[in-house]
Amino acid sequence: MRTVLSLLAIALLVQGAAPDRAVTPTRSTPLFNGRDLSGWTADVPEKDTNPSAPDSFIVRGGMLVSLGTPPGHLLTTSTYRNYRLEVEYRFPGKPGNCGVLVHASTPRALYKMFPQSIEVQMMHENAGDFWCIKENIEVADMEKRRPRKEGEKWGGSEGDARRILNLTDGSEKPPGQWNTLIVEARDRGIKVWVNGDLVNDGFNCTADRGRIALQAEGSEVELRRVEIGPLPAATK
């Protein structure tokens, strides 16, 4: 019975990500209301076999908190395209790993854990890296910024060179202080800023819409603002 319910939950996640339902924001809107997880759906694989496992995502003191374990993802119930996403986050204790995933679609597509998406890394001292998860994106200077081991190819599958290094060092603030992460998803392009620094700029993405997801990946992370809005006018 639990397996059936899990499969139904995954099916609903996929159904909710239907491309024709993608929203293009026309005004700035909080995705987190400061009170509860309305508008979000948790996908935590451990709960399939252990329903008593603790929640990976909670609301505490008006903040959305990724507890880091059990590993999993919190996904918006709506899908989006052509938007500007702003996230304010910090590591309240020991810094570690987390991420914001954009254009998320098929759940558990990689390693039976990660949804198909482009991850914008929040890992301490690596904020702004891209990780390709069953999707792909290109950047300038690919040979330098997307290193490959012998036999690897650029792609988003297991065994591929999936990591794309960011453009800067030193853009993050020390643990305990608040960082601002901005993601602009425009057609097949994705740009990322950390605390005002442009840290990544990708193009020819294999997706242009999907859910937005937050990770629980080993470290506690507090988020006090998660807001989506329209893109600024494109500059030539």
Image (cartoon, helix red, strand yellow):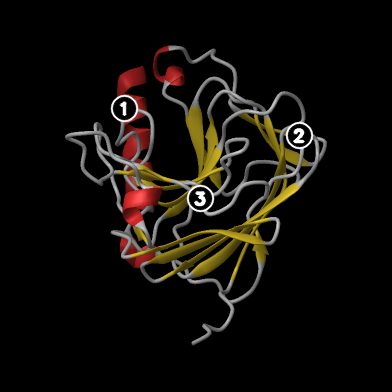
The amino acid type of the residue labelled 1 equals Tyr
Earlier residue among tags 2 and 1: 1
Indicate the amino acid at tag 3: Asn
Q: Is residue 177 left or right of residue 140?
A: right
Q: Which residue is mark 2?
A: 175
Report the residue that reaches farthest toward the left: 151
Q: Comparing marks 1 and 3, which lies closer to the viewer?
A: 3
Q: Circle 1 is placed at which residue position?
A: 111
Tell me the crowding category of disc 1: few under 14, some 14 to 19, or many 20 or more residues within 10 angstroms, Cα based: few
Badge 2 density bin: few <14, some 14–19, many ≥20, Cα 10 Å? some
Query: Please, is residue 182 above or below residue 94 in the view?
Result: below
Relative height, residue 46 to residue 213 (above, below): above
**Mark pair 3, 2: CA separation:** 19 Å
In the image, what residue occupies the spot 32% across and 59% down? 207
Dot 3 alpha-carbon crowd within 10 angstroms: few under 14, some 14 to 19, many 20 or more: many
Callouts 1 and 3 close, C-beta under 8 Å: no
Task: Give residue 36's quadrant in the image.
Answer: top right
- Helix or strand or loop: what does disc 2 sit on? loop
Placement of 134 over or under 182, stated as above or below: above
Front residue of 153 and 227: 153
In x, y percent, where is residue 95? 68, 28
Residue at image location 52% in from the left, 68% down from the top: 83
x and y percent of residue 232 in the render? 59, 78
Image quadrant of residue 91?
top right
Report the mark closest to the observer, 2 or 1.
2
Label ID, residue 212: none
Q: Which residue is mark 3?
A: 166
Mark-to-mark CA distance, 2 and 1: 29 Å
210 or 142: nearer the viewer: 142
Q: Is residue 165 left or right of residue 36?
A: left
Q: CA distance from mark 1 to mark 3?
A: 24 Å
